[in-house]
Amino acid sequence: MTTDPCAVRAHDLGKTYAVRGVKGGVRALDGLDVTVGRGIVFGLLGPNGAGKSTTVKILTTLTRPDRGTAVIEGVDVRRRPDQVRRLIGVVAQRSGSDPRATARENLVLQARLHGMGRHSARARATELLARFDLAEVAGRLVSTLSGGTQRRLDVALGLVHRPAVLFLDEPTTGLDPEARAAMWAEIRRLAGDDGLTVVLTTHYLEEADRLAERLAIVDHGRVVAGGTPDELKGELRGDAVHLELPSGTVPAQVRAVLEDLPPIREVRVSGGGVSARADNGAAAVPAVLAALERAGTPAASVTVARPSLDDVFLRYTGRRYPPESDPDTPSGDGTPPGRETPPGADAAPGVQAVPQPGPSARKEAAR
Amino acid sequence: MTAAPVTAPAPRAFTVPRLIGHTWLLTGRRLHAVARQPAVIAGNLVQPAIWLFLFGSLFRRVVDIPGFGHGSYLGYLVPGVIAMNAMNASMWAGVAMIEEIDRGTLNRFLTSPVSRVALMTSGVADQAVTTGLQSVAILLFGLLGGAHYPGGIAGCAAVVAAGVLLGTVFGGLSNAMGMLLRQREAIIGFNVLFMLPLTFLSSAFMPTALMPRWIRVITACNPLDWAVRAGRSALTTSPDWASVAARGGGLLALAVVCVGISVATFRSYQKSV
């Protein structure tokens, strides 16, 4: 069908939502570029409101970008949306299954809407019910199924027509840990399918780290870093050293002290503490503590960690990754996003300012 | 490469077989859900039955008013209650649409190659089926109560058809409102505001000959009245088929316009989603 070696290619995507009371609207995407190779699990990682869902909505023809181009398997999403819809499978944040129909009926209908005949639709439904461990509940109304079971059905619905690219938008949000682990196993299994490309959005660092072969970190409507999780972490060269400071200590002073120490690099103030890197974090700790003691600004605690995606995020955005907000809040659907202000990286010195997402202000852009 | 020029969209896969096929599948989906709740179907008949028998008894004597022109008030009432029921039932279609949006079902369909028109026609087609069945039931209630339908089967069919078309008008409007406003409250407010005025500004309960002039003028523009009059005329001994066809044609045209408006709302939905 196409000679494009990439499953997804998006260039300079921009999208602003009109929001009453916000002059100029809310910018959800601001020049986002992303390229996804075939046959991999690709992760779009970012905090809520970063623009991941808007990206998926554009790539799945649900909405149109204000600017930029997007191509799925060589087919332009703006010019040939109908053709794109045959190439993609979509598992959206919200279930999308019909709660008043049975699991089997949902699958059969989806297959028939994709043009399958009655018999092949039934056969395909049976196949997917077995594969996703749904055979036992095939005849039950979806409204009576558990959240994790419904999610498996959602994935099955996305795969009915054997798409080339499967979009999974926050597939584990709202699932309990057990169901989440099961879903992760399922996604890994999908990647083994011949040729299926999976585009996964998530705001869970761990999920991205475990599942995605390649990642794009999205923040404020653009991609700030990309690569394999190991590449991204490897670029940080060294361990993360994080100092918590007692209240009253000025982080800038501490930073000045640390910057004079040879093994310490990339010192930055984050939250109420100070973060830095060192090739051998553990070995650097005594020198750090001694220097701070001499300067009269002792630390409250020190942690040393191998680099994580959290650190990658800090490095590219200048702020720590927002803590996981309550995963069970998929409200605000269909409404444009609230403006997200960056949790102040340099604000509120002396206070352990874990950036607290205001529940309404940080909804993912127009889920 | 900069932003691609927005070229004319590629030829829409707007093929009639696909439209019909998808409407069939999606209507079947909705009717299946309705059929699972027989209690709801029965419950929905309680209200028209109350209207029919309550008003039929309460105002039994109005036929004695000079100029009323009908022998039995119950018989007079049947086409009125059918039209009223058709409108009442269909006005809530938009709430179901909002539920589909909230649940994500609409988005699932929109990211599949589903005919956009079929999404909307199925939203009124299921209503048409239930409205048709309810209209038949109301006709039977009337028979039980002693009403006569001199128009026979053809007349009864015309009453049911008028009810179905009227339901499609309000179903299409309600779906459009659901898509644009996406608030149940808006639909509830609209329905509460318009349901009774539209019903009483018609000849459902009182012949136009006995109305004040200003009400008569409004009534002539009320699609509910078109359905009532078309139905009532069709049930008489010698129906004036020309006027039945004129009013029915008016309803059909309006139904097409309203469903067309609801299809057009996908554009605005796509912008805001």
Image (cartoon, coloured by chain):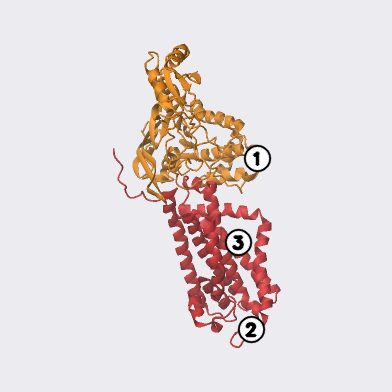
Chain colours: A orange, B red
Query: In x, y percent, where is residue A36?
Result: 40, 31
- Residue at (59, 40) in percent of width and height: A150
Q: SS for tag 2? A: helix
Q: Which residue is mark 3?
A: B130
Query: In x, y percent, where is residue A211?
Result: 50, 27
Q: Which image quadrant for residue A132? A: top right
Q: Amino acid at mark 2?
A: Val
Q: Which residue is mark 2?
A: B63
On the question of residue B24 being in view, the answer is no
Q: Amino acid at mark 3?
A: Thr
Disc nearer the start of the sequence (2/3): 2
Q: Which image quadrant for residue B130? A: bottom right
Q: Amino acid at mark 1?
A: Val
- Circle 3 marks a residue in which chain? B
On the question of residue A313 being in view, the answer is yes
Kindly indicate whether the residue at mark 3 contacts the one at mark 2 (C-beta within 8 angstroms). no
Instruction: From this view, report whether residue A232 is shown above or below residue A7.
Output: above
Q: Residues within 10 Å of mark 2 (few under 14, many from 20)?
A: some
Q: Residues within 10 Å of mark 1 (few under 14, many from 20)?
A: some
Compare residues B195 and A131 and report the one nearer the observer: B195
- Circle 2 marks a residue in which chain? B
Compare residues B252 and A283 and report the one nearer the observer: A283
Compare residues A237 and A228 and report the one nearer the observer: A237
Q: Which residue is mark 1?
A: A137
